[in-house]
């Protein structure tokens, strides 16, 4: 145990003291908060792009008096003109586009709309034009049937579904968007950490083998102790970095209302008395945070230990040939990538058969379960998933330890998969 501790401390301290570790530890939270602030700024920045449209509506399908309701888009009707004449001069007249509206000549019931422009219109402009025309036609149809469109608009104005979450702490206001974001962010973070720290284990073993340092170390430390010490040391680095990230992100998020005062203003709408920032904090507090933190730490720990043991075994079999290392690592990374793909489905459909299978299958469960953890999933799913992952960790650690003790001292010829299996299951 003392020898494992020595290897653990060597791996941990040598990495924590590196400048790259300090830079990534403090820069990543700043980048995340900066991204978060940029999203808020963009969402609060209303479009003010002005667009003038020349309109030819010879059948008078639109109500000209009720078209210019948008402050950014202006419609000028020129029904005395023809398409051929306007196409040549609408740009010189100061218009950005030309809209032609023709009555349906068939039995489809849909009128023909055609818009000319020197280049493709932006999505906001196109959506605004379509919305204005749709509302105009809708209002005319309602008025023809004796229905006041403003009455319908008042009934639907500000209509919004509020999600109340019932838990042990009482009723809390939830947000599907926040739950989705937390699940996706945790799954993506775990996906990245498994690959990054797993490959660090492989590179560390491979470099020591190439430099013949491992030959000196194994003279006083058993190969299995060396492998376990390296895995635990590098895993502790990842855990330390993650805890620091959480603390820094939690502290830095309170700077957002200072940078963007508008984010701290009450939201508009019926019954809205919280700011955007307050609504986000309220939605986060409605989530089962203790459950999320426990599950993240558990799946990071055992997911990392499972994959790191395999990466360590691969590192013991390769030398300085990076192409050879990539070929052997690819089958290991495939389940992690598959887990990430399944996680993107699990955040939308947490109880689908694919999400349930992915969260229980031990090679994908660390990532996929993150996509389901903010939802109310059966406890037996969690129990079976955890037990399967622990069992897989014990099996792969035992098998990788047997491969490692032979592979770390072998040089020259690349072992075949048949030889590797013999190393794993040989007795003694």
Image (cartoon, rainbow, N blue to C red):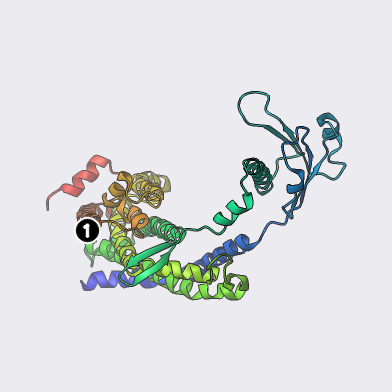
Which residue is located at x 44 percent, y 66 percent?
283
The front one of 381 and 89 is 89
Give the farthest residue toward the left. Answer: 428
The front one of 171 and 418 is 171
Image position of 172 (left or right of 26): left
The answer to whether residue 65 is above or below residue 276 is above
The front one of 40 and 101 is 101
Label total for image = 1
Give the farthest residue toward the front. Answer: 146
Horizontal and vertical percent for residue 312?
Answer: 31, 56
Element type where label 1 sits in the image: helix
The answer to whether residue 8 is above or below residue 398 is below
Which residue is located at x 19 percent, y 55 percent?
391
The answer to whether residue 87 is above or below residue 366 is above
Residue position marked by numbered label 1 in the rendering = 383
Q: Report which quarter residue 2 is drawn in.
A: bottom left
Horizontal and vertical percent for residue 390?
Answer: 22, 58
Give the farthest residue toward the top. Answer: 106
Which quarter of the image is occupied by the N terminus? Answer: bottom left
Horizontal and vertical percent for residue 116?
Answer: 75, 36
**Number of residues whose C-alpha sits closer than 10 Å to that of mark 1, classed few (under 14), some (14–19) or many (20 or more):** few
In this rendering, does residue 210 appear at all?
no
């Amino acid at each position: 145990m003392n020898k494992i501790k020595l290897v653990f401390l060597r791996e941990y301290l040598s990495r924590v003291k590196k400048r790259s570790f300090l830079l990534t530890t403090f820069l990543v939270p700043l980048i995340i908060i900066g991204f978060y602030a940029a999203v808020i700024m963009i969402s609060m920045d209303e479009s003010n792009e002005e667009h003038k449209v020349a309109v030819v509506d010879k059948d008078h399908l639109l109500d000209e008096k009720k078209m210019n309701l948008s402050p950014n888009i202006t419609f000028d009707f020129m029904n005395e003109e023809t398409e051929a004449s306007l196409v040549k001069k609408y740009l010189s007249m100061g218009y950005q586009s030309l809209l032609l509206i023709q009555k349906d000549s068939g039995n489809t019931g849909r009128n023909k709309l055609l818009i000319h422009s020197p280049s493709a219109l932006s999505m906001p402009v196109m959506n605004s034009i379509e919305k204005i025309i749709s509302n105009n036609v809708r209002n005319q149809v309602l008025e023809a049937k004796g229905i006041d469109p403003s009455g319908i608009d008042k009934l639907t104005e500000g209509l919004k579904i509020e999600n109340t979450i019932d838990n042990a702490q009482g009723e809390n206001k939830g947000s599907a968007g926040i739950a989705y974001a937390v699940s996706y962010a945790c799954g993506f973070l775990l996906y990245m950490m498994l690959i990054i720290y797993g490959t660090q284990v492989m590179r560390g073993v491979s470099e020591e083998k190439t430099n013949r340092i491992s030959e000196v170390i194994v003279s006083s430390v058993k190969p299995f102790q060396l492998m376990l010490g390296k895995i635990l040391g590098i895993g502790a680095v990842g855990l330390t970095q993650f805890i620091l990230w959480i603390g820094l992100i939690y502290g830095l998020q309170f700077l957002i209302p200072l940078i963007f005062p508008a984010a701290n203003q009450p939201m508009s709408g019926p019954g809205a008395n919280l700011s955007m920032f307050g609504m986000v904090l309220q939605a986060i507090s409605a989530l089962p945070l203790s459950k999320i933190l426990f599950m993240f730490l558990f799946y990071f720990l055992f997911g990392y230990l499972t994959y790191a043991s395999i990466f360590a075994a691969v590192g013991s079999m390769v030398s300085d040939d990076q192409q050879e290392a990539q070929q052997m690592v690819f089958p290991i990374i495939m389940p992690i990538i598959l887990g990430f793909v399944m996680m993107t489905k699990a955040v939308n459909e947490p109880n689908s058969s694919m999400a349930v299978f992915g969260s229980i299958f031990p090679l994908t469960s660390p990532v996929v379960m993150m996509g389901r953890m903010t939802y109310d999933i059966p406890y037996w799913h969690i129990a079976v998933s955890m037990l399967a992952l622990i069992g897989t960790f014990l099996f792969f650690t035992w098998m990788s330890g047997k491969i490692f003790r032979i592979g770390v001292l072998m040089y020259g010829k690349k072992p075949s998969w048949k030889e590797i299996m013999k190393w794993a299951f040989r007795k003694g």
